[in-house]
Image (cartoon, helix red, strand yellow):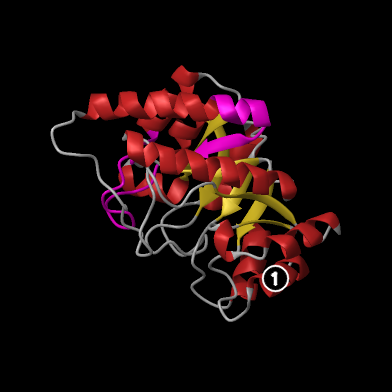
Amino acid sequence: MDYSICLETFFPELDFMEKIERAGEAGFKKIEFWDHGSKNIKELVRFVKEGQVEISTFSGHRKGELFSDAGFKEYKDEIVQSIKIAKELKTPGLMILSQGLHPDGSALSVPSAGHSRETLLSRLFNNLLQLSRIAEQEKITLYLEPLNSKIDHPGIFLDSSRAAFKLVREIASPQLKVLYDIYHMQIMEGNIIDTLKENISYIGYIHIADVPGRHEPGTGELNYKHILKVLKDMNFSGTVGFELFPSKDSADVLAGIKSILV
């Protein structure tokens, strides 16, 4: 198990490359981010080659959807391009969703009326199967992330870890795993530790933020020191990413995060 910091929300006063340097000074060499289109990829490649940073994941798409033909074409094209960039950055996996998001977090598109959830999940299955075959050829892992539809992402279709685990289990590709975001799933389902124990073999990546507020551990209701110990005891071999909005100075929040790592 290793740890990563999502730099999108840390050090808001700095540009992205400066954020990397500050995270490194705080002891975090591994980072993740969202949209690669807003990043200086050439400069990031240089940082990676020089050993200044490791990029654990980034968003594989920002548009498209998994439940319509037209939407999937856009989605797939983005994934193919993102895989090329991931290889340049030596990034082992990409985050993927059921559909793209507006800047405010709401879903870009929603399924057409008249389709049952079972039909839509069948479409997700077929399209994820196509993507997993591409990922297998390219040796890149896709991390399928269910989000919460109650607060942050209204309209998101895949808002259930049970559905995500079922899709990953049935597709049975070594390059398709669930990104289990504890913040989102605490809001939607709760029962975090039992869910982790029952599904750990299908989880490739974990995101952390406290509830409520999506701030750092210790600001809400979740005992993250205990959760991290449970993951260590289960020999979780993936990455735990701190994807959160600091409630105070970013450097102080990073110091607090270091204090709970196991």
When asked about the image quadrant of residue 97, the answer is: top left
Q: Badge 1: few (under 14), some or many (20 or more) residues near its Cα, within 10 Å?
A: some
Callout 1, which amino acid? Answer: Met
The residue identified by callout 1 is: 17
Determine if the magenta segment contains residue 61.
Answer: no
Q: Position of residue 223 (x, y in %)?
A: 49, 51
From the image, which quarter does the N terminus lie in? top right
Can I make out residue 202 in this image?
no
The part of the chain drawn in magenta is: 133-161
Determine if the magenta segment contains residue 156.
Answer: yes
Can I make out residue 169 in this image?
yes
Q: Is residue 229 toward the left or the right of residue 248 in the image? A: right
Tell me if residue 67 comes above or below residue 256 in the rendering: above
* Residue at the image point whose x is 29% and y is 57% from the top: 151
When asked about the image quadrant of residue 238, the answer is: top right
Q: 66 or 12: nearer the eye?
A: 66
Q: Element under label 1?
A: helix
* Residue at the image point whose x is 45% and y is 29% from the top: 128
Tell me if residue 218 comes above or below residue 118 in the rendering: below
Q: Is residue 120 toward the left or the right of residue 230 in the image? A: left
Tell me if residue 246 comes above or below residue 159 in the rendering: below
Which residue reaches farthest bottom?
A: 13
Q: Position of residue 24 (x, y in %)?
A: 76, 66
Q: Position of residue 192 (x, y in %)?
A: 43, 40
Q: Position of residue 239 (x, y in %)?
A: 64, 43
Count of picture labels: 1
* Residue at the image point whose x is 80% and y is 61% from the top: 46
Which residue reaches farthest left?
A: 114
